[in-house]
Image (cartoon, helix red, strand yellow):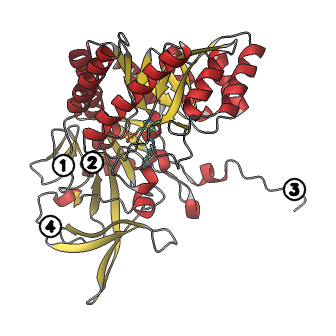
Amino acid sequence: MLNDHLRINEKGNLEIGGCDTTELVKEFGTPLYVMDEMNIRHNCRRYKQAMDIFYDGNGLVLYAGKAFLTMAMCKIIEQEGLGLDVVSGGEIYTAIKTGFPMERVYFHGNNKTPEEISMGIEHGIGRFVVDNQTELEAIERIAAEQSKRVKVSFRIKPGVDAHTHEFIQTGQIDSKFGVALENGEAEEIIALAARMKHIDVVGVHCHIGSQIFALEPFERTAEVMLSFIADIRDQYGIHITELNLGGGFGIQYTEKDEPLEYDQFIEAVSKVVKRVCHEKGLGRMYMLMEPGRSIAAPAGITLYRVGNVKDIKDVRKYISIDGGMCDNPRYALYQAEYTALLANRAAAAKTEIVTIAGKCCESGDLIAKDIAIPPAKPGDIMAVLATGAYNYSMAMNYNRNGKPPVVLVKDGKSRLIVKREDYSDLLRNDILPVDL
Ligand code: LLP
């Protein structure tokens, strides 16, 4: 699990981006999210280069901001030449405030509010990925009010089984996202949109799920989507020129996970897209992919301070840390597995099986169950690996815990990109009525 950006230094401490984690903890405290800038950039480049090599650059890699989005992250994504997948007014606002080129922003989501739609149109967002008919009608109405034309893509459920956790699987008919192929919803909405005055129909989109390790579901999805594009052309004379195949590429959380190289996804789907486009006379199809986790997760670690150790004889040993589900709710939600080590004794043998518990009032507040780590004692620093995605972005204030800060590291230097929430931040929006 230790890769290029993580190493153990001569003091036996874990190092990330050339920074000793024990020094980071001295400076910034715990819990602490640490993101390795070069790893993020490297991951972006892998995807972008693959798009250039295997698909002649006729496409765009969008970073799915839901994985981890801050202004600094937006800047890095912009500098690496990627686009951005957003799903809320808050994510759009982050992009606007960072000066991200709005034509490279794609707006997803199954319930965009009129305010968000209006904000997107006003700021010239690149694409609306339309989820349903009500939304389409709202976009048409608001675009008319603003005298603008809007380019849209449609979220389609291709009906492909992605072999992943039920909660993060999204391509099947019984899903809250998008319109289905098999009951005709998809073609109906596209035919309707093509008749609207302020809408330009340009693309179709799908996302079959997350943390997927196989190529085959993506290849099959590409075939299904292209057949649909050809059907729409033949039946309605509507020419769709953009195919967005979503994200979902799996990463390594533990030794059990065997992820593919990132290039392989783009290489595999590129072949299918080129072949099917040729067979069906679809011309050059602009292709988009939307990785989130695989760009951000491997770059991040979380550092905690070990607190109480509770060894329940013949039952279980709990190691409590000063964070938990508030900064990483993924075990509580998906029984997600992680790798952990002691940052201040990083080379020590993992001789104990323990359960890492958070500090929230919730029995399910665990970070990992029955994992191997070296014997830990209060005061040690615990590092949980591959937490760069869906940790900070899913953090919460349960039990009035403040969210940890985020530090960006590179070449032995650290820069704070998100401040720690202190007690006053927790009261920021509280109002104590004077007459109470
Ligand atoms: N595109 C769309 C439309 C999506 O819905 C998602 C993720 C992505 C791209 C990026 O997928 P990725 O490459 O990151 O797998 N909170 C869950 C993951 C939810 C994913 C939601 N959509 C987790 O912590 O595992």
Q: Which mark is residue 343?
A: none
**How far separated are the C-alphas under marks 2 and 4?**
23 Å
Label 3 sits on residue: 434
Which tag, 2 or 1, sits closer to the chain's start?
A: 2
Q: Position of residue 6 (x, y in %)?
A: 19, 44
The quarter of the displayed image where residue 144 is located: top right
**How far separated are the C-alphas under marks 3 and 1?**
59 Å
The answer to the question of whether label 2 and label 1 lie on touching residues, with beta carbons closer than 8 A, is no
**How far separated are the C-alphas under marks 2 and 1?**
32 Å
Q: Position of residue 54 (x, y in %)?
A: 22, 19
Label 4 sits on residue: 350
Of labels 2 and 1, the one closer to you: 1
Label 2 sits on residue: 23
Is the CB–ligand 1 distance for label 1 below 8 Å? no
| Amino acid at dot 4 | Lys
How many marks on residues? 4
**How far separated are the C-alphas under marks 2 and 3?**
45 Å
